[in-house]
Amino acid sequence: MKAALLRSSRTLNRKAVLFLDFSQFEKETNDNHSKNQDNQFSTAVSMFTVGGMIGSFSTTFMVTKFGRKGAQFVNCFASFIGAAFYVASFYLSSHYCLLLARLAVGFFAGLSTGICPMYVIEISTADFRGKAGVLPQLFITIGILTAQILSFPSILGKASLWGWFMALGSIPCIIWILYSPKMVESPRYTLIEKNNSEQAQEDLRKLRGVEDVSAELAELEDEAAKLKAEQSEEDDGMTVMELFKDPSLRWQLLIVCVAQMGQQLSGINAIFFYTNDIFKAAGFSTETSTMISALVGLENVAMTFVSLAVIEKFGRTGLHVGGNILMVIFCAGMFLCLKYLTAASFVPYLSIVCILGYIVGFAVGPGPVPWIWNSEYFPQRARGPAGSVSCALNWTAAFLVGKFFPIAQSAIGEWVFIFFCAVSAFLAVFLWKFAPETKGKSFAEINAEFAKMNGMEVQETEMLKSDEK
């Protein structure tokens, strides 16, 4: 009897050990599965910015080979490919299709950020360039708001529709292609880079709505003649390496690169990507957080309209510096709100005010202005490679923020907002001191001012001569 009880006890002990081992194994398996899902999600998110970097680097080739309008026409097919992979990922439950979809859509977005601001700046008159330059940023904010509204659970934010929801991004491309026959190519590209004076004249008449465009055409022809005289027959355009080596473009390149990287490192995508998480940390429910995120998107659109209205009055540099000062103030406020979240019942609501104030600062200046400078600061031959470099840096910074913000937030909590605050403060000081104002100035006047900053005589600056009247 005693032996039987001993055997039974040993059997129960072995089963208990096996049960404990299995429970531990199951827990570790679940943890590993959760980590694997997090890694897959993080990779899928980052593939968008990787595609954006590739698309940005393609700007020089695309705008030179196909023109501004033609390059965007070709680019639309990248969006269609991305939409197809989204739907395939949805029906096939394929993680790899999702990665390809994110890569293709990212490529489309990256190339668009290089093409669209360049196109609208080139077809605009000097007194309208600022407003025209804000338009791409305005429609980006409208797109973000539209996506936020459509993602409500009562509309398309359902697990059973996510593939088709993500594919909706190709609809604007369909509209663009249908409307493209009514659009014109940039006359600067047509005449200066393709030497087609007749087509440039016809396009100028359509753009300006008048028959007599002889004065503007003469300026373009004079610019084209000077540029042709400076180029060798084998020279088919400036490369990225030549851009970095040209002493007449040093300050333009430095200012634009600092502005583009600072735009992302100041934390705007951290705010947009993780707004719901921030509001949850502040104690709001999921439904409330979603509604507040849509409110943030609406405010972003409204303040971009404000930038559109005042940019020709206050100037590019003035709005950028002023916007960064506001971002410093409200980013510091966000840090304090998250640090002392439970100090009083009103603190969570104060965090909403800080986010809204931060968006005000970003939308009026740091959001749209760097894209205007991409084209305004550079002469015709340098715009393609300059757009490639600056846009690629912007996307690189966006990748870094998207990849490492969650890690930094887990490690140091609300202190991560002090870094964003410091970046905005640096931008405000740097741009106030070094970025020249360009409102109402011709390309020749802008280039002459940078010639002085670069320590070069205007008449001896090879790349800048091409934009003199």
Image: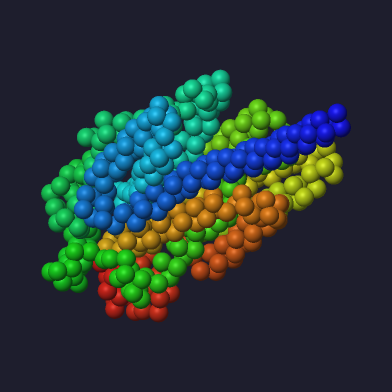
- In this view of the protein, can residue 45 be seen by the observer? no
Residue under the image location 44 percent in, 38 percent down: 95
Q: Residue placed at 47% from the left, 24% from the top?
A: 161
At a point 23% along the width and 59% down the height, the residue shown is 219
The residue nearer to you, when weighing 169 against 307, is: 169
Side of 221 relative to 337 (left or right): left
Closest to the observer, 243 or 323? 243
Up-down: is 102 above or below 228?
above
Taking the view exactly as shown, the residue that stands out farthest to the top is 154
Residue 118: x and y, percent? 34, 52
Disc tally is 0
Percent coordinates x, y for residue 232 in the rendering? 15, 71
Find residue 292 and report its horizontal and vertical position in percent. 64, 33
> How is the model colour-coded?
rainbow
Q: Is residue 386 visible?
A: yes
Figure quadrant of the C terminus: bottom left
Quarter of the image containing the N terminus?
A: top right
Q: Residue furthest right?
A: 2
- Give 444 or 86, whichever is nearer the viewer: 86
Q: Height in image: 46 above or below 224?
A: above
* Residue occupying the point 65% across, 33% down: 289
Q: Position of residue 448 (x, y in %)?
A: 36, 70
Looking at the image, residue 236 sits to the left or right of residue 38; the answer is: left
Asked whether, in this view, residue 227 is left or right of residue 13, the answer is: left
Q: Quadrant of residue 303?
A: top right
